[in-house]
Every structure is written in structure tokens, then in C-alpha cells.
Image (cartoon, rainbow, N blue to C red):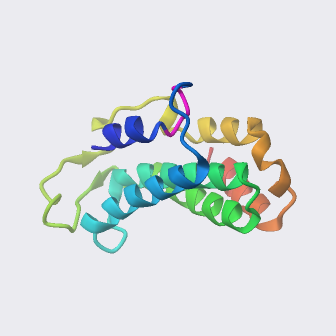
Amino acid sequence: MNAMIYSYGDFFNEDPKRKIDHEEKIQLIKKCMRIFDAYMDDDDYGSFSFYVGQYNEFLAREYAAMGMYEETIQHFEKAVEGWISYINRPNEYTFRNVLLDHYPNAKGCEAQGDYSTLSRYKRDIDSDKNFDFVRENERFTLAYRKLIAEE
């Protein structure tokens, strides 16, 4: 499901022929987040916290590209929380939600790669010029320090 959402939304802007404006992409990302909220109970995300972190990262990037200061910082903080939650989740996790309580959720069973590491997020944040206007903000700096402390 998530792969289809990514390709539909072209969240990484990989298709030069299909440029989605910032407002439309923000609405699509928020819809994706509501899908997770619809079937995850009380922040019972487990490995799915990875996607929650990414969706907030995408929102932070879109808001940053639009120059929206508070929204950029707010979603960057949430992205860092999601990434750290994903990295620090227990080795074995049992969902409380009856839709997923049978789903095997062990760290070793998941595909690992560059997009699931905190160092990738740090590199992306460091190189993204859209974040320059908030880099000196205390909340942004604190969240960034949490990110690199976990790396």
C-alpha cells in the first residue's frame, strides 16, 4: 500500500513530467497519514513508525519549500520523533490492533537500506537548502541534535 502511495504522490519528485504543486502534495501526504491513523491504535505503529517519520519529513520539506516557518519546524520535530521511534523500537513487537496482531514484527525481518537509517536523514537535511531559513531556530536545532545523537 505504501509503495503505491509513494509512486502516486511522487514524493521524491523523481518524475520530471509529473510535477505536483506543494499544496496538492501536502494534502495527499496528510491523507496518507490519516490512512495509518485509521487502523493504528494509540500510536501503535511499530515498524510503521518509519512511514510516519517519512510522511512528516515530506511535510516538512513541502512547507520549507513554501517558506512556511512554523509548519516546517513542527513537522521536522515530528519526523525526528518518528525516525527515532523506528530505530529504537523493540526487537520483537506485538501490535495491539486486531488487524495486525498476527503480523510478525521483528527487526531482523524487515528490509534494511539507506532509506531506513538516521544517517540518510541527516545527509538529506544537511544538503537541503530549503531548510536554511529555519536552521537557526532553537526547536529545529534541538530536534536536529536529537537526530545526530541517535545516529
Quadrant of residue 144 within the rendered picture? bottom right
Q: As drawn, is 105 to the left or to the right of 144?
A: left
Residue at 44%, 42% (x, y): give it: 9
Residue 142 seen in render: yes
Q: Quadrant of the N terminus?
A: top left
Quadrant of residue 100 within the rendered picture? bottom left
Residue at 50%, 31% (x, y): give it: 18
Residue 42 lies, with reference to residue 7, above or below; the image says below
Residue at 63%, 43% (x, y): give it: 151
Q: As drawn, is 23 to the left or to the right of 6?
A: right
Residue 83 seen in render: no
Q: Which residues are magenta?
A: 11-15
Q: Residue furthest right?
A: 136
User: Depth check: 104 or 68 in front?
Assistant: 68
User: Depth check: 15 or 122 in front?
Assistant: 15
Residue 11 at x, y percent in the picture:
50, 40
